Image (cartoon, rainbow, N blue to C red):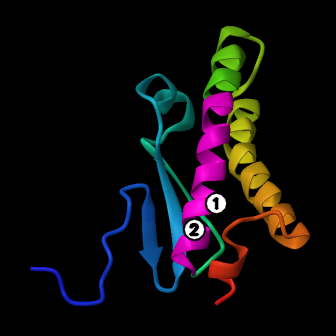
Amino acid sequence: MRRKGLRRLPPHLLLRGTTYYLRIAVPARFRPLLGRAELWRSLRTRHLSCAKARSAAAYVRIDALWQRLDEAVEDSSVDFGHISRLAHQWLKEALDEHKLQLATGRDSHLSVAAR
């Protein structure tokens, strides 16, 4: 039985304290390289609507990340540090892009997140 007032979150979002986090499963082929089955990152918000928008921006970039990692793995001269930096760069880019959208008023979730 669910308590009144509690919302069920999408499986990729977690609420820890008052901050939402994004949880992304690492494809099996990259798990040995990254040493993880999941990537977790703060979405730097306490608003669900903003967390959903930021996670959507991150998911748009995740496909590009996996492609870049595939290319890096094929290049045997690339070291683990480079691969790890690629894996962490994608979320920073997605969050930075979303912050720019908020600052310029181009984000449709601005009015909801500001409440």
Q: Amino acid at mark 2?
A: Ala
Location of mark 1 (residue): 54
| Residue under the image location 51 percent in, 27 percent down | 30
Give the Cα separation between the discs numbered 1 and 2. Answer: 5 Å
User: What secondary structure is marked by label 2?
Assistant: helix
Callout 1 touching callout 2 (CB < 8 Å)? yes
**Magenta highlight on residue 94:** no
Q: Position of residue 59 (x, y in %)?
A: 59, 44
Residue 93: percent from left, percent from top: 78, 50
Part of the protein shown in magenta? 47-65
Residue ID at (55%, 29%): 33
In the image, residue 111 sits, relative to residue 33, either above or below, namely below
- Determine whether the residue tagged by mark 1 lies in a helix, strand or loop: helix
- Residue 107, located in which quarter of the rendered image? bottom right
Residue at 85% from the left image edge and 70% from the top image edge:
105
* Residue at numbered disc 2: 51
- Please indicate whether residue 21 sits to the left or right of residue 69 in the image: left
Question: Which of the pair 49/80 is nearer the observer?
Answer: 49
- Which residue occupies the foreground of this view, 83 or 2? 2
Q: Main secondary structure of the magenta part?
A: helix
Q: Quadrant of residue 71?
A: top right
Given the image, on which type of amino acid does mark 1 rest?
Answer: Arg
In which quadrant will I find the C terminus?
bottom right
Q: Position of residue 112 (x, y in %)?
A: 62, 80
Give the numbered dot on residue 80. Answer: none
* In this picture, residue 55 sits left or right of residue 36: right
Is the residue 65 above or below the residue 6 in the image? above
Percent of width and height locating residue 104: 90, 68
